[in-house]
Amino acid sequence: MSIRRQCDLLGLARSTYYHQPATETTENLKLMRIMDEQHMKHPEFGRRMMTDWLALQGHDVNEKRVQRLMKLMGLQAVYCRPRTTIRNQAHKIYPYLLRGLEINYPDQVWCTDITYIPMAYGFMYLVAIMDWYSRHVLAWQLSNTLEGTFCNETLEEALEHRQPVIFNTDQGAQFTSQAFTSILEERRIQVSMDGRGRALDNVFIERLWRTLKYDNIYLKDYATVVDLRSGLTEFFHFYSQERPHQSLGGQTPWSVYNAAV
């Protein structure tokens, strides 16, 4: 089957077919995979704790090496959760609007985040946008860098049919950039940003990452970006349209999100 035909069947741009994962040495990729899984279990681990823990597991590492890899992965020691986005001090920071707010209908609040995706021979970054009330994943995209373009494109895709009253992000440079916030402000969408170091301000998309990694990424060990994209397409379809959620009374996110339409 030709590459063109494969891309057509996957709904994949041909340029994306040739995307390569970001790479490190084989040993570092192994360490990064272990660190990512450990950070999902214990997000309180900073570079010193992670270094000591790896040493106890028999890995010959020093703090400088662990610090470099954690920075590459977006894991910041001073935060109580993985931070794949780093604040740009020159960008405007918006207040957190969700504290004490009762969220009780679709499109009231959307949220977004970026996570590190380990692969067999490299790694990628994934951004997703979710409706807070229904947990429905509205759009997602992969990138082999943390440049903000892929976040802007994902936002534009999510806004093609509907839009929220409030859009919540963390304080990462990708989301505080004028290119990103202007898309929201032009549509008169209120911008909300997590407080620094607050692990629960974007809790539902953090739970999505946990489910994704334990139910899919860690089990599949994808070798190519095409395979990863195909696998994520299947996962997000299942997560939103087939998997019943206990918090939604056994309904799917897709059915709850579209109930009011």
Image (spheres, rainbow, N blue to C red):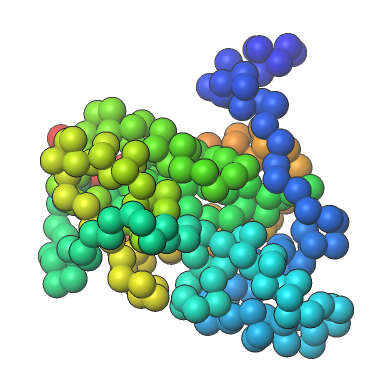
Q: Is residue 134 left or right of residue 39?
A: left
Compared with 125, 224 (above or below) is: above
Position of residue 251 measured from the top left corner of the image (x, y, whole percent): 30, 51
Q: Quadrant of residue 197?
A: bottom left
Q: Is residue 120 left or right of residue 208?
A: right
Q: Quadrant of residue 91?
A: bottom left
Residue 26, visible in the rendered structure = yes
Residue reaching furthest front?
Answer: 90
Q: Residue at x 36, y 31 (%)?
A: 157
Position of residue 49 measured from the top left corner of the image (x, y, whole percent): 65, 86
The N terminus appears in which quarter of the rendering? Answer: top right
Q: Residue at x 47, y 47 (%)?
A: 127
Q: Nearer the viewer, residue 100 or 175?
A: 175
Q: Residue at x 36, y 56 (%)?
A: 90
Compared with 197, 205 (above or below) is: above
Position of residue 130 measured from the top left corner of the image (x, y, whole percent): 34, 49
The C terminus appears in which quarter of the rendering? Answer: top left
Residue 253, visible in the rendered structure = no
Label total for image:
0
Compared with 52, 66 (above or below) is: above
Position of residue 30 measured from the top left corner of the image (x, y, whole percent): 79, 62
Compared with 183, 32 (above or below) is: below
Q: Is residue 122 left or right of residue 234?
A: right
Q: Is residue 63 left or right of residue 215?
A: right
Q: Residue at x 66, y 18 (%)?
A: 6
Q: Quadrant of residue 10?
A: top right
